[in-house]
Image (spheres, rainbow, N blue to C red):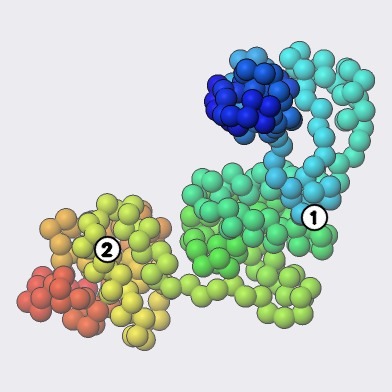
Amino acid sequence: MGDAFCPDCKRSTEVVFDHSAGDTVCYECGLVLEAHSIDETSEWRTFANESADNDPVRVGGPTNPLLTDGGLSTVISKPNGGQAEFLSSSLGRWQSRGANPDRNLILAFKTIATMADRLGLVATIKDRANEIYKKIEDLKSIRGRNQDAILAACLYIACRQEDRPRTVKEICSVANGATKKEIGRAKEFIVKQLEVEMGQSMEMGTIHAGDFLRRFCSHLGMTNQAVKAAQEAVHKSEELDIRRSPISIAAAVIYMITQLSDDKKPLKDISLATGVAEGTIRNSYKDLYPYASRIIPTSYAKEEDLKNLCSP
């Protein structure tokens, strides 16, 4: 019930909403004030196949321009009887006979989505990885190669291009058994193929130690003060001529910062959190140690505090 102006009654009267017809009717004279109005309230009917499924979603996924049909094809669901009954039915036989040109692409996109979700990556990285795989798949040059390594390499390249790099070891942890060496070879193969196709070098993005630092610090449970000090130290270390990988420098800086705090982290824990070998962290720390007074912020550690750092 509500109020609205009725032209027949020539005054504001109570109205009744007929939801089945979409009409707004004057309660006193019965005049239809508005016909076929749109009901904008929520609708929570269930359109799922199973009665026990209370999911109110009744639409398909978004369109996918990477697929031939845009991702809008119709798939006949299996009945409650299971796979055998479905295949024995006429609809099941016709669907199984129909060749879906995007079947391999759909499976690959699902695998990429699973890996991205396990790493907590955003949708833009997932979409970029799908685009890279689509391009390399169209070249028909990945037949016979390790599919898991190819998909993992696409995700690695996408992370680099979106300025959200992940280490090869992190990618390897979700790559369904593909090794670091296989992913590395797949990455080089994809870059080479796409560069030949495009006729120019492929932009991969530059890796900085700071890209990994906050994530590594989070894994170690470091305080905000220690994280800020480590970020400033990493930023200053880029001005030095330290010929180490950004990941190794990040791990060495974390080791140096934690040694100056009350919550000291063992080298083994830092190695596990960063994926850098203990020996590599020691060597990187040895290179950074002479510049400790230059890179460690004075707000975090004074000159006399730096004497507490262990000698490499």
Q: What x and y, as percent, mark residue 162?
A: 55, 65
Residue at the (57%, 23%) spot, across then down: 14
**Pointer 2 residue:** 227
Report whether 194 appears left or right of 52.
right
Residue at the (15%, 77%) spot, across then down: 298
Neighbourhood count class around disc 1 (C-alpha, 10 Å): few under 14, some 14–19, many 20 upward: few
Q: Residue furthest front?
A: 10
Res 80 quadrant in image = top right
Report whether 99 appears left or right of 16.
right
**Pointer 1 residue:** 143
Whether residue 197 can be seen here: yes
Q: In the rendered image of this protein, does residue 177 appear above or below residue 167?
A: above
How far is disc 1 from disc 2 in space, using C-alphas?
A: 45 Å
- Of marks 1 and 2, the one in the foreground: 2
Whether residue 44 can be seen here: no
Looking at numbered disc 2 in the image, what kind of residue is underneath it?
A: Val
Looking at numbered disc 1 in the image, what kind of residue is underneath it?
A: Arg
Q: What x and y, as percent, mark residue 116?
A: 56, 50
The quadrant in which the N terminus is found is top right
Q: What x and y, as percent, mark residue 256?
A: 23, 68
Res 287 quadrant in image = bottom left
Q: In the rendered image of this protein, does residue 63 appear above or below residue 195?
A: above
Q: In the rendered image of this protein, does residue 135 appear above or below residue 4?
A: below
Report whether 194 appears left or right of 251.
right
The quadrant in which the C terminus is found is bottom left
Q: Nearer the viewer, residue 42 or 117?
A: 42
Q: Nearer the viewer, residue 261 or 18?
A: 18
Tag 2 secondary structure = helix
Tag 1 secondary structure = loop
Q: In the rendered image of this protein, does residue 83 appear above or below residue 38?
A: above
Residue at the (57%, 25%) spot, across then down: 13
Residue at the (38%, 58%) spot, across then down: 215
